[in-house]
Image (cartoon, rainbow, N blue to C red):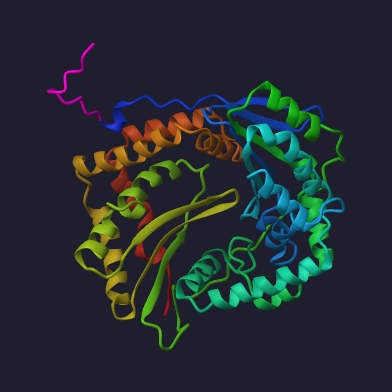
Amino acid sequence: MILDRTSPPEIHDAVEFDYKLPPINTEKLDNGLPFYWLDAGVQDVVQIDWIFPAGLWYEQKPSVAHATAGLMKNGTTKYTSEQIHESLEFYGAQLKVSAGNDFGNITLHCLTKHLPSLLPMVYEIINDAAFPEHEVEIHKHNAIQRLLVNLRQCEFVANQRIDAVLFGEAHPYGRFSKKENIEALNREDLVAFYKTHFNLANAKIFMAGKVGEQEVKIVNSIFGQPINEKSGLQELSFPAPPPVERVLKINNDPNGVQGAIRIGRMFPNRHHPDYTPMVVLNTLFGGYFGSRLMSNIREEKGFTYGIYSSLGPDLNGGSLVIHTETGRDVVEPAIKEIYHEMEVLCNEQATDEELLLVKNYLLGGLLGDLDGPFSILQRWRTLILHGFTEEYFNNNINIYKTISAKELQILAQKYFNKNDFNEVVVI
C-alpha cells in the first residue's frame, strides 16, 4: 500500500485518547517482602528500587537521614568503598541511595544480564553497611563545605526558609541543614538510624525493564532469604508551626543583584479531593512554560527568566509554592503581579481554548510517561507508596479531561487568597 502524502494525517487532541496504566505484577518473596515488577522494556536494562521508611520524617536528630543514605555504599564488612565503586563501574551500573521527606530510596540501574553479579553487593549494603569512622568524617567535612557554598546563593536560602515558615523548623518538612547539626553527627547516630529504618524487613521492592520470571527468581534467591523482624517505627507527631510574620525578608548578600522570591501556603496532599483539580489549576497558573505567571512576568514584564508554581504532596502534608528569581530592583513589582494573576483566576474563568491547551499538556505528558518501563514503574510506585490503586489513576484522568473552567474558578477562590500565603524574599 502506497501512502498518500498529499493528505496530512488527522490531528487529535490528547483529551481524545484513552489512558490505561499497564498492569504491575504483585508478589511476595519467600520471606514475605512485597515485590512489584513489570516487563515493559525493549532494551536489556533493568531498574530496581528498594524503598524504606527512612526519610526526614523519621529523624530523631537533624541531618541523620541524608548522612546515612550518603554513606551506605561507602563500605561494608565485606566490601570497601573502592571495591563497591569499582564493581559498579566495571558492570556499567549505577547505584543511588537517597533520602527524601518520607522515604529512603536505593535505586539500581544495570544491564539485565548483570543482576546476578550486582544484587549480592546491594544485599550487603542493605544488611551490612559499615559506616567507617573516616568515611563519616569525610562526609561531614564535604557536607559542611557544600552547605557553606550553597548558603551564598539566595535561591538556596529561600528554598530552606519557605519550608521552615510553612511547616515550622521543628517539623521534618521544615527542618533545614545547619553547620552545627552536621558537626554534631557521629557514627553511632548513623548506625542506629540505619538499623532501624533501612531494615530490609521494612522494604518494598520494585523492578521494571526487560525482565521476566527468571529475573524474579534471581531477586527472590537473594532478597527472599530469611530476615529479621521489622524494627519498630515510632508514631511521630509534630506541633503546628508557631505564628510568623507573613512576609520574611532576608538580606543574604548586601552586594547581591538578584532576589529569590518564594510565595507559599499549606495545601492538602494526594488524599484530598481538591488535589487533582489543583494540579490542573496550578498548571494553568504556573505549572508549565505557557502558564499565566510565565506569560506575564517573563514574557510581558521581563522580570525573570523563569517562574513556576508547584505542589509538594508528601505523605504527611503538602504545600503550594511559587518560586522565581528576579533582579533585586523588580522584586516588589514581580510579587504584585503574582497576586494579580491569582486575582484574575478568582474573578474570571479561563477560556475554553486555554483550558484545552492545559489539558492537552497534562495528558500529553502522560502519554510519554506510559511509553517507558521506568516511568511506568514510577507511576505505580507513587500509587502504592501512597496507598492508592489503579482506580486513583483512572479518576485523575477523568478529572483532567472533564474539569470545567467554572470548577477551576471556584477552586481558585478557595485557595488563592493573598492573606493565606507567606512570602520569603532573599537578596
301 w.r.t. 293: above or below: below
Asked if residue 2 lies in the magenta stretch, the reply is yes
Q: Residue at x 20, y 25 (%)?
A: 10
Can the viewer see residue 234 in this picture?
Answer: no
**Which residue of the protein is positioned furthest toward the left in this rendering?**
6
Task: Pinpoint residue 354: horizontal percent, then vertical percent.
Answer: 22, 44
- Is residue 373 or residue 362 the one in the foreground? 373
Task: Pinpoint residue 233: horizontal percent, then vertical percent.
Answer: 78, 49
- Is residue 110 or residue 240 the one in the foreground? 110
- Is residue 85 toward the left or the right of residue 272 in the image? right
Task: Pinpoint residue 275: horizontal percent, then vertical percent.
Answer: 45, 45
- Is residue 405 or residue 57 the one in the foreground? 57
- What type of secondary structure mainly makes up the magenta span? loop
- Is residue 135 toward the left or the right of residue 426 in the image? right
Can the viewer see residue 398 in this picture?
Answer: yes
**Which residue of the protein is positioned furthest toward the bottom in this rendering?**
254
Q: Quadrant of the C terminus?
A: bottom left
46 w.r.t. 325: above or below: above
Q: Residue at x 76, y 49 (%)?
A: 198
- Quadrant of residue 382 within the rendered picture: top right
203 w.r.t. 370: above or below: below
Label tally: 0
Q: Quadrant of the N terminus?
A: top left
Asked if residue 101 lies in the magenta stretch, the reply is no
Q: Which residues are magenta?
A: 1-12
**Which residue of the protein is positioned furthest toward the front in this rendering?**
90
